[in-house]
Image (tube, rainbow, N blue to C red):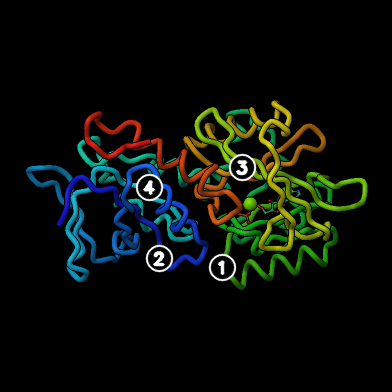
Amino acid sequence: MGTGVVVLMTDHNSGEGSRVPLEKAVEVLTGAPPLSIDARHFMRGGSGRVSFGGSGFWMEVASEGLVVSPEVLIVYEIPPAERGRLVAFQRQLSPEGPVSFDVDADAWCNATDKRRTVDCFRRAGIAQMETIALCRPDLGTALDAFERLGQDVWARPTVGAGGADVFHLTTRTHLRAALGHYAASEQDWLLSRDARNITKDGRRHQFRVVVLHDHVLRVCEHVQADPDAPCNESRGAVSTVIPTEDLPPQYRRLAVAATRSLGLPFGGVDLATENGGVVFEVNVHPTLDVPAGMETVAIPFVQAPLRVMKQGAGVVNA
Ligand SMILES: Nc1ncnc2c1ncn2[C@@H]1O[C@H](COP(=O)(O)OP(=O)(O)O)[C@@H](O)[C@H]1O
Ligand SMILES: [Mg+2]
């Protein structure tokens, strides 16, 4: 049906809303919107097929009447829990395939599986709160970790998003409740010392820093009125965009180094600056449905693969 097109692959089941700013960014940069494909077709069990024909890399979804050989492939908005199902597709993206960017399955996994994140940070010397990974522990093992970490800890699922199933625990009763919650929902989890990222007036405080290579694209300051709730917007934190240079350089460098330590060229870093600064996580696909998300993040993200595309292909006009 077409060659020379830009394909945007996202999970159309996700309600997060990054697809629209990415579509607009492609249109601004190339003069035409991308061909949007539902990533679920190319996840394990999907009907999408990949082949290498005479003229290159082809993607086909017979049920949709879709056959395309993308020149540029952009992948985004793949929810953390679904990423494992896209790995086989990602491994087929060879240098002979479309120009793509930030599709390394191992790097995604380093960011998505927080046990691996903690190990990567430790190896690279990225400041983080002391953490103990728990799979499905018995009460004694969990209590031991709770006590070793000072009985003021945060529990997070190993694979999570948006602050869901994240708890601040300061008593054995809290710990028992969290243990029961993760067992019932069949999740592995982590315990970390509290970062004490609290303002003088008792609110939680942190930053979301979006990084592309060595550059900081966007910084938001997050304030959470409930000191026991995660500092995620979806959990009631108030997010304010601030000029990137207002974040002191050592924390900008920390965000860049944290992203790089996972093997990612791009990411949305959650970090606190109190007590020297620590990183909580790096998001593979930070949401772009945010104020000025198209201009500040989607455009440079889309520009990255367009820039490496062959000169004279006639696609880039910005
Ligand atoms: N050790 C900690 N100290 C203070 N706050 C924490 C700690 N661990 C997690 N949190 C809070 O919980 C939020 C959610 O954890 P995070 O790792 O960002 O997972 P996700 O956002 O994917 O759910 C963090 O951004 C932070 O606000
Ligand atoms: Mg987070």
Which disc number belongs to residue 186?
Answer: 1
Look at discs 4 and 3 and give the one toward the viewer.
Answer: 4
Task: Give SS at disc 4.
Answer: helix
Badge 3: how crowded within 10 Å, few (<14), some, or many (20+)?
many
Q: Pointer 2: what residue?
A: 12
Disc 2 is placed on an element classified as loop
Q: Give the amino acid at mark 1.
A: Glu
- What is the CA distance from the residue labelled 2 to the residue labelled 3? 24 Å
Residue 141 visible in the current orientation:
no
Instruction: Farthest residue to the right: give it.
Output: 201
Percent across and percent down for residue 106 are 42, 42
Q: Residue sitting at 78 percent across and 52 percent down? A: 223
Residue behind mark 4: 26
Task: Report the disc number at residue 214.
Answer: none
Instruction: Tell whether label 1 touches label 3 (CB within 8 Å).
Output: no
Q: CA distance from mark 2 to mark 1?
A: 26 Å
Determine the residue positioned at 58% across, 41% down: 210
**On screen, residue 179 above or below 204:** below
- Mark 3, residue position: 269
* SS category of the residue bearing label 1: loop
- Quarter of the image where one finds residue 310: top left
First in sequence, mark 2 or 3: give its number. Answer: 2
Question: Which amino acid lies under the numbered mark 4 shown in the image of this protein?
Answer: Val
Nearer to us of marks 2 and 3 is: 2
Q: Residue 299, can we see it?
A: yes
Chain-order first, disc 2 or disc 1: 2
Q: Position of residue 146 (x, y in %)?
A: 77, 53
Earlier in the chain: of badge 4 and badge 1, it is 4
Residue type, mark 2 in image:
His
